[in-house]
Image (tube, coloured by chain):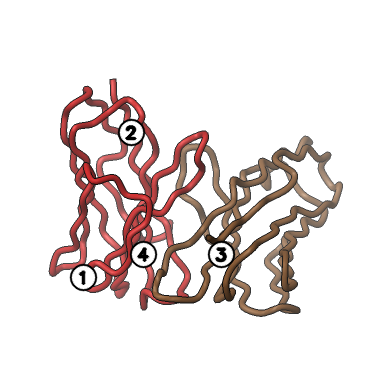
Chain colours: A brown, B red
Amino acid sequence: EDQVTQSPEALRLQEGESSSLNCSYTVSGLRGLFWYRQDPGKGPEFLFTLYSAGEEKEKERLKATLTKKESFLHITAPKPEDSATYLCAVHSGGSNYKLTFGKGTLLTVNP
Amino acid sequence: DSGVTQTPKHLITATGQRVTLRCSPRSGDLSVYWYQQSLDQGLQFLIQYYNGEERAKGNILERFSAQQFPDLHSELNLSSLELGDSALYFCASGTSGSTDTQYFGPGTRLTVL
């Protein structure tokens, strides 16, 4: 059974204070790791897909990295509009195409 | 805007009733995935359809069923509703049904009273 654990559960930052969110996973053959952002009451918004250890992707103030056991979402100089829940999900091998999600990290950025 | 549409946005109903949620995938996407999100469980995969055929099943109750029509829109039917079925229901779509990115719709909030 695939497992995804995200930490911390909640993170409060001051505007401009950089930090990282962690996603640890246990899967039987990783096919892809996905990061989403979700605002309250809205659908998850796609951010990144990572496929292999060592891969990195960037978008504005966000950078995602992947190792064989975990992924990090680095947030550089965050702004209040970056406040949201960040979800990590994995897709493992086999015929089941579902995504297994972690419970998310609630990020609050104070001005 | 992801390009995935879901209706209705909100649904309030009583225990024992049946409801239908509708999803239209992004143009060109053949796969539709249904997820349930509750406060304590997080996002849970329910079922996937690819080009009209059921491809994968997750933690979907027997009271729930889904189908994908020739125009590729999908419906999730929930019957004999219980209080615990209250949740956000999301539909996502993808191109190939394999390791492709899933784009989520805005969701339907179901409240069972």
Mark 1 surroundings: few (<14), some (14-19) or many (≥20) residues within 10 A: few
Tag in front: 2 or 4: 2
Tag in front: 4 or 3: 3
Q: Residue at x 77, y 59 (%)?
A: A74
Q: Which mark is residue B93?
A: 4
Tag 1 and tag 3 share a subunit: no
Mark 3 surroundings: few (<14), some (14-19) or many (≥20) residues within 10 A: many
User: Quadrant location of residue B54?
Assistant: bottom left
Residues marked 1 and 2 touching at CB (< 8 Å): no
Q: Amino acid at mark 2?
A: Asp
Tell me which chain the residue with mark 4 is part of: B
Compute the Cα span from label 2 to label 4: 23 Å
Q: Position of residue A1 (x, y in %)?
A: 53, 60
Q: Amino acid at mark 3?
A: Val
Per the image, the residue denoted by label 2 is B85
Per the image, the residue denoted by label 3 is A90
Q: Position of residue A92 (x, y in %)?
A: 52, 71
Tag in front: 1 or 4: 1
Q: Residue at x 15, y 68 (%)?
A: B71
Question: Which quadrant is home to the C terminus of chain B?
Answer: top left
Compute the Cα span from label 1 to label 4: 14 Å
Dot 1: element:
strand
Tell me which chain the residue with mark 1 is part of: B
Compute the Cα span from label 4 to label 3: 16 Å
Q: Which mark is residue B105?
A: none
